[in-house]
Amino acid sequence: MGVNVTPVPDDRRRDFHQVLGVVFGFDANDADYERMDSYLPWDRARAAFDGEALVGTLGAFSLDMTVPGGTMACGGTTVVSVLPTHRRRGVLRVMIDSHLAEVRDREEPIAGLWASDSAIYGRFGYGSAARATEIEIMRDHGAFHRLVPEPAPVRLIDTSEAASILPRFFDDFRLRYPGMFARSHAWWENRRFFDDRHNRNGFTGYRFAVTEAAGSVTGYVQYRYKPDWNDGHGEGTIRVIEMFAGEPSAWAGLWRYLLDHDLTAKVVAPNRSLEDPIFEMLAGRRRAKGTVEDSLWIRIMDVKRALEGRRYSAPARTVLAVHDPIDGSLTRWQLDLSAEGAAVAATSAEPEVSMALEDLGAGLMGWPRFQDLGRIGRLEGDPRILADLDAAFTWSPGPWCPEVF
């Protein structure tokens, strides 16, 4: 019997959640379902059925995502799963086809996701567009460089005050980094501030601290603490959930606060920008250990709108051929990129550069690898043109998506 993909019937939503639990390894329960039900847009969700059995899930968020120099509508691909009984049977392909058709219908120029397996999504045209690093610093090695500014004072706040004052700061901050996206009230309530005591793994509940100037928040950190003792001495761990700051003294204040925490041996901060200020703030840069992984993946749905919807750091002109693995199409585009904007038009001219859609999407957020990919043969083009494209697409600060969605 063939697999059929449809919107999720109201009476099968709990089955949808159960399938997610089987695939991602959690015990589905009513409380978790009700929380998911409060923020997942069910009108964008899809379920795969084998007869009456629900065997696959996929959803999407309507994200307003920061791109270099602006923002762009993004279909945020999420909750993708296929039961182990139905692997290698084309279920994911059928769900992706349905999902991307829906993204096109909504006229979203890009789709984005976090990949649970980095080998899966290139064949659907998604490219690795951002990286993240997990930083670990031993407290004994937390001395700052002599040129770091005076750390701003830090104030502890409770969750209620955090919910009142942090979203406004975040709304402004997220526009600085390609890959970050706007958060709704429901997102804050059910994803950022929701604190499930059963999944703390020995850590405390959320704690919040802010830096301020003239009555306004200039930075904040959300974290947990896990106590530990060795020979009568405290060797606890701080785990950063998220931390953002809008000025150097705020970055210094928040990091100093974490690294000066009593009874603590180390600070661990996952999903940080590769350009996190701590690397240059420490007296010994190598004392901050970073483990780098891919984070945000981007698929370009509309080449013209996606490329014209961002800014560029340098001029570049070329004719580009783009291959889409979903339908095998090859489109050609005349690119005229500059710091003032971009003009992108379909053309029949001979291409000077040819690449897969995933490699174009990988560069969209400001982390291009066109020369690197040319050197290993993943794309074709004159090295001088590839150098121009790298210079044009590169953005500072680099892309950062600090939150899995």
Image (tube, helix red, strand yellow):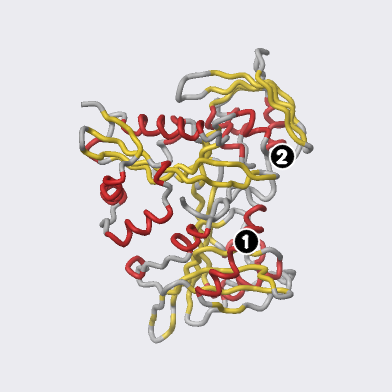
* Residue 388, quarter of the rendered image: top right
Identify which amino acid the numbered label 1 is placed on: Phe
Which image quarter holds the N terminus?
A: top left
Which secondary structure, mark 1? helix
Rounded to the nearest angstrom, the CA distance separating label 2 from label 1 is: 28 Å
Q: Residue at 31%, 45% (x, y): give it.
A: 10
- At label 1, counting other C-alpha atoms closer than 10 Å, the crowd grade (few under 14, some 14-19, many 20 or more) is some
- Rendered location of residue 117, percent (x, y): 39, 42
- Rendered location of residue 84, percent (x, y): 24, 40
Q: Which residue is mark 2?
A: 311
Q: Earlier in the sequence, mark 2 or mark 1?
A: 1
Residue 202 in view: yes
Residue 384 in view: no
- Rendered location of residue 361, percent (x, y): 56, 35
- Rendered location of residue 40, percent (x, y): 41, 50
Q: Nearer the viewer, residue 301 or 351?
A: 301
Q: Residue furthest front?
A: 10
Which mark is in front, 2 or 1?
2
Q: Nearer the viewer, residue 138 or 187?
A: 187
- At label 2, counting other C-alpha atoms closer than 10 Å, the crowd grade (few under 14, some 14-19, many 20 or more) is many
Which secondary structure, mark 2? loop
Q: Which residue is mark 1?
A: 279
